[in-house]
Image (spheres, grey):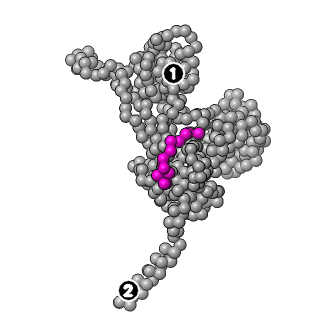
Amino acid sequence: MKHWIAALSLSFGFAAGAHAAVLPDFADLVAEQSPAVVNITTTQDKRTLSHPRMPNMPKDEMYEFFRRFMPPEGEQRNLPPKRGQGSGFIISTDGYILTNTHVIDDADEVTVKLNDKREYTAKVIGSDDRTDIALLKIEARNLPRVNIGDPGRLRVGEWVLAIGAPFGFENSATAGIVSAKGRALPDENYVPFIQTDVAVNPGNSGGPLFNLRGEVVGVNSQIISRSGGYMGLSFAIPIDVAMDVVKQIRDSGKVNRGRLGVLIQEVTSDLADSFGLKEPRGALVSEVEAGGPADKAGLKPSDIILKFDGREVPNSIELPRMVGATTPGKRTTLEVWRKGRAHTVDITVGEMAQDKQAGDSPKKRVADKAGLVVSKLNADQKQELKVDSGVLVEESTGAAARAGLRPQDVIVSVDGEPVNSAEELSRAFNDNDRKSFALLIKRAGGSLYVPLKLK
């Protein structure tokens, strides 16, 4: 029995040793690459809280109690500064740093802390909401920088390493494998995410994802979690996507993307059969924007786009990425399936409207003459509110606060004219000599008109 136990132990030890021999040692990689990874802290100074309105109730004793002890509607008080944290990495020796847009969004001050504990106030050179990539600059020289890798060479099952500051714990290293490539996430049409099982938590955002050669292959960006913490599903932006955004920001100050002006949907097996396709592929056009590039090219609803610029469109997820990466104004061709056969369509790619000018610092949040700071509504917000137009109130001071407008109100129209941006709202107040306006707003699921008087 003793011999059997010894033999079993020897066998197990050999097996464990053989298994351990193929596991990577990340120590040298961490030592070499950590100096180029930075910790980012942000401060948002201007924060206010509006007091709630009087409850809708009968004018009895309780109403009198609320009236006496509730502050006047629209009155605001200042909140303490809000601080945020994330990660980033140095891409050039003269101080350019790459991180996520959501790390620095709405920040009044961005501070970068290097591995050697030096701290710098960073300038936001530009950012891109659609890819969640931001470019920062610090005034420093001879800095360590990362090496850029090729995410196209990544294989599912390959080891990767993240370095960042989860929950503020600086220079933390976590490792795992590539779980999948080219993942599409909801509302993220322009990024073919790298999925990993690397432990990524709040604070890791914007940090690098390394391969075993010590090259950055991705920017850690998102997790899917029911708890708010790591649950085995982490997503990184491929570094080639990020560096293309960086190049456009540095070259032109903005990110240009192509557009066709169509709504598309996935081609299912049943739909493929209905349209006479042998297999489900391509992107089915469900709507064509009037006057858009696709409309001018003669595209129609029920067309299935099989190829774009000579490249196969395997599914509807890939088409926005392919079109978005195309220079606006380029003339190209589409292969579409229409009425049982393939057609070639010539098209000139249009330009997608900018969500935010890359190069505009998120701290530039200027109130209009009414004292309002507003932001655009996205498509999901409009659908949820059941409105075709509107802007979200972020801050309310001056005349707007006196009128009772408060953060989270949605201004749908001014004097019956719809508004969709801060510029349109300002024009509505500036384009005439009147000082009194009727604002239609959405609040807590209901609609009401608010009179706004300017001094």
**Residue at (44, 38) in percent of width and height:** 43
Residue furthest left in the image: 61
**Residue at (56, 47) in percent of width and height:** 140
Is 315 in the magenta?
no
Q: Which mark is residue 100?
A: none
Q: Is residue 323 above or below residue 200?
A: above
- Marks 2 and 1 sit apart, C-alpha to C-alpha, by 81 Å
Q: Estimate the x, y position of residue 293 in percent, counting from the top left.
A: 72, 33
**Residue at (59, 39) in percent of width and height:** 126
Residue position marked by numbered label 1 in the rendering: 368
Q: Main secondary structure of the magenta part?
A: strand
Q: Estimate the x, y position of residue 17 in percent, counting from the top left.
A: 48, 78
Q: Quadrant of the N terminus?
A: bottom left
The residues colored magenta run: 113-125
Q: Which mark is residue 5?
A: 2
Q: Is residue 61 above or below residue 48?
A: above
